[in-house]
Amino acid sequence: MSRLSEEFTVGSVRVAALSDGAPDRPLGGFFHGIEPAQWMTELGITDPATPLPFNFGTFLIRDGARTILVDSGYGAPARTMGIPGGGELLERIAELGVAREEIDSVVHTHLHPDHCGGDVQEGDELAFPNATIYVAAVELEFWLNSPEAPEDRAAVAKQQMLPYQAASRIHTFEGEFEVAPGLTTIPTPGHTPGHTSLMLASGGEHLLITGDAAHHPVHFEHHDWIPGVDLDPAESTRSRGRLSALAVDRDALVTGGHFPILTLGKVRRTAGGYAWEYARKVEA
Ligand SMILES: [Zn+2]
């Protein structure tokens, strides 16, 4: 099991990687249609069923003025899923000395159950009563109103979003949008229609939070290794390409909610494409 919480800084901004559950599980589903021999080599394993550290992660960003949560984990359902640390995000936040009432914004990379499930507590109580929810307009529209949205997942998104909508606490955005000074949304559709990554800039340093545009760092090297959960594989492949170029361009540290805590790396351009270089790696 990987860690459940770790803090680091980007310029003068404090960032905490917080887990809402960190199971070990086989990752083969993230490399759809790719020969196991190929991706097993990249992951350093010899049996495709080998459990590897996985994470249902979120990030708490504090710049001294704002307290911003990126995604909210599975929430209550994770407590019955038998995953270490599952459904304990509010405890992780409290351990930092932050009250949930202090969180002024929750930014969603997308509205899958493992990313927005912690917005509302049992009984429809807002888990973050003073927060504005930031979500891409197309993402909210898809999960609330599209007949093409998978029904079970749409039910969770509705359950989580409607109480905030009723309280007029949802702010939708399109394209690149500055949530707070130095924190900008980057559209990376494909995994879901309005999937969004985030770029944080402070003091000349950059942090790219991928969301589910990458489930594993190896996705930065193989843009067409498609997670089976991507709704539009061609689009998500293109998004990984754009994100890789941006990471190189800004010399950004890169992390993702599903990477074990704490995983930080940089993307480098190579002759044939891109390479991932670890800056911080979880000990095996
Ligand atoms: Zn996810």
Image: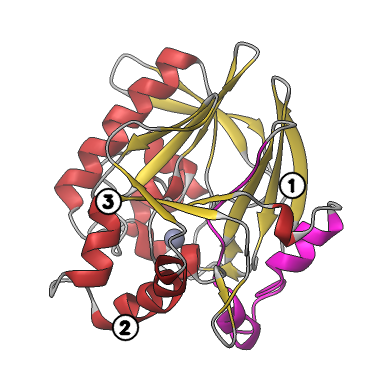
Q: Position of residue 50 (x, y in %)?
A: 54, 67
Name which residue lies at 16% across and 70% down: 146
Instruction: Mark yes or no: residue 2 visible.
Output: no
Judge depth for marks 2 and 3 and give the one in front: 3
Relative height, residue 256 to residue 252 (above, below): below
Label 3 sits on residue: 137
Q: CA distance from mark 2 to mark 3?
A: 21 Å
Q: Choose the circle earlier in sequence order: 1 or 3.
A: 3
Going by the picture, which residue comes out furthest to the top?
204
- Whether label 2 touches label 3, CB < 8 Å: no
Q: Residues within 10 Å of mark 1 (few under 14, many from 20)?
A: few
In the rendered structure, find residue 283 and report the number of the disc placed on it.
1
* Label 3 SS: helix
Q: Are marks 1 and 3 in contact (CB under 8 Å)?
A: no
Earlier sequence position, callout 2 versus callout 3: 3
Q: Is residue 83 above or below residue 35?
A: below
Q: Residues within 10 Å of mark 3 (few under 14, many from 20)?
A: some
Q: What span is colored magenta in the figure?
A: 66-95
Kindly state the secondary structure of the residue where label 1 is placed: loop
Residue type beneath disc 1: Glu
Asked whether 96 or 166 is in front, the reply is: 166
Disc 1 to disc 3, C-alpha distance:
39 Å
Instruction: Mark 1 vs mark 2: give the one in front.
Output: 2
Residue at x 21% of width, y 36% of height:
238
- Residue at x-position 63% and y-position 41%: 263
Kindly identify which residue carries mark 2. Answer: 152
